Structures are given as structure tokens and as C-alpha cells.
Amino acid sequence: DDALTAVLIAPPGVETADRTLVVNLRDECAPGTFERVLEVVAADSAERDGSRVRWSEYKARGLELTKHDM
């Protein structure tokens, strides 16, 4: 397979085309339309509040969410 994989790194405030997969490193939910979004959640429970807010927002958008402990 000669498929090309590209990674786009965009700072907040920069508009990008919709993607199939988004790796969100921002403090807010990933913008746009996508099939999957991956987020890294802090191990320290005191630092998880933002992740909890994003989880709730993604659910409100109708996304099916799955948690993976690593």
C-alpha cells in the first residue's frame, strides 16, 4: 500500500479542514467534523477537570466515547 499519511499540527485559532482523526492537545474540544478524536488525560485527578468538561461536551455532540487506561 502506497498510502500517504500526513500529520497537521495547528495552533488554536487556526482554521483547518475536517479530518477523519484528530489528536486534540487543546484545552477545549476539537473543532470541526471528525470520525475519531484522541485526547491524553492527565494521571493526576486534580488536573482532569478540563478533560471531564470536554468528555461531557463530546457526549452532548452525540459522539460515542470510549475510555482507554494506558
Image (cartoon, rainbow, N blue to C red):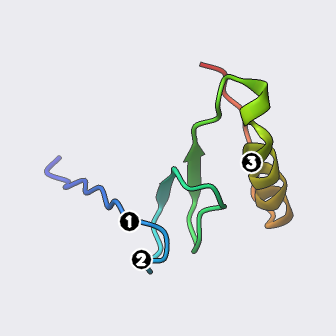
For the residues labelled 3 and 1, the Cα–Cα distance comes to 20 Å
N-terminal-most mark, 2 or 3: 2
The quarter holding residue 67 reads top right
Task: Name the spot of residue 3 as percent of width and height, x first.
Answer: 20, 54
Q: Disc count in the image?
A: 3
Q: Name which residue type carries label 2.
A: Thr
The residue tagged 3 is 50
Q: Name which residue type carries label 1.
A: Ala
N-terminal-most mark, 3 or 1: 1
- The quarter in which the C terminus is drawn is top right
N-terminal-most mark, 1 or 2: 1
Q: Which mark is residue 39?
A: none
Q: Secondary structure at mark 1?
A: loop
Residue under the point 81% across and 45% down = 52
Decide: is 24 above or below 14: above
- Say few, some or many: other residues with alpha carbon within 10 Å of mark 1 (under 14 / 14 to 19 / 20 or more): few
Q: Residue furthest top?
A: 70
Task: Name the spot of residue 29 as percent of width and height, x first.
Answer: 66, 61
**Is label 1 in contact with label 2 (beta carbons under 8 Å)?**
yes
The quarter holding residue 35 reads bottom right
Decide: is 33 above or below 59: below
Residue under the point 58% across and 52% down = 37
Eye-nearest disc, 1 or 2: 1
The residue tagged 2 is 16
Eye-nearest disc, 2 or 3: 3
Q: Secondary structure at mark 3?
A: helix
Residue under the point 62% across and 55% down = 27
Q: Name which residue type carries label 3.
A: Gly
Decide: is 17 above or below 34: below
The residue tagged 1 is 10
For the residues labelled 1 and 2, the Cα–Cα distance comes to 8 Å
